[in-house]
Image (cartoon, grey):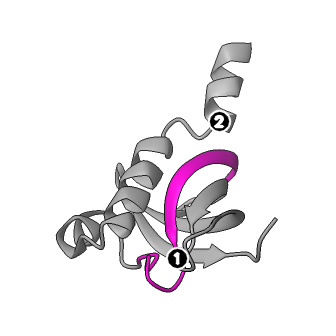
Amino acid sequence: MLACISVGCSGAAEQPVVDRFFSASRLHDKTALNAIGTVELDPVHVGAVTDFKILHVDREAANETVTVDATLHLPDGSFGRRRIVLTLKRDGGKLTVTGATVAPGL
């Protein structure tokens, strides 16, 4: 039972969706983004996520809020850590990224 709780809290179900979202945003791939979300993180203005760890997942009936600690390749060429909060909408078994908020540097 402890393993089940641990997996549920780690964002196992959200991990592939978040990974595909960050990859598609990094590449500015509109086709891939349309398949998994209604928003993007613009790599030119925000930066590109190069690595992330899911810190927390809040699950509600139709939405989930996923908080991640991310390393970004920033527009000025440097790297920095940011906290990113994603809103995911659950429609049947499919998760869609519908919101993304990037907090200032950590």
61 vs 41: above or below: above
Q: Position of residue 26 (x, y in %)?
A: 38, 65
Q: Quadrant of residue 67?
A: bottom right
Q: Which mark is residue 99?
A: 1
Q: Secondary structure at mark 1?
A: strand
The structure residue drawn at horizontal position 46% and vertical position 76%, both measured from the top left corner, is 41
Q: Report the Cα–Cα distance between label 2 and label 1.
A: 20 Å
The structure residue drawn at horizontal position 56% and vertical position 68%, both measured from the top left corner, is 87
In magenta segment, residue 3? no
Q: Nearer the viewer, residue 51 or 21?
A: 51
* Image: magenta residue range: 40-57
Q: Quadrant of residue 72?
A: bottom right
Q: Position of residue 17 (x, y in %)?
A: 40, 51
Tell me if residue 3 can be seen: yes
Q: Where does the N terminus fall, quadrant-wise?
A: top right
Tell me if residue 65 can be seen: no
Q: Position of residue 3 (x, y in %)?
A: 67, 15
Q: Which mark is residue 19?
A: none
Q: Which mark is residue 10?
A: 2
Q: Position of residue 10 (x, y in %)?
A: 65, 35
Dot placed on the residue nearer the N-terminal end, 2 or 1: 2
Name of the residue lying farthest toward the right: 106
The structure residue drawn at horizontal position 30% and vertical position 66%, both measured from the top left corner, is 27
Q: Amino acid at mark 1?
A: Gly
66 vs 98: above or below: above
Q: Amino acid at mark 2?
A: Ser
Q: Secondary structure at mark 2?
A: loop
67 vs 87: above or below: above
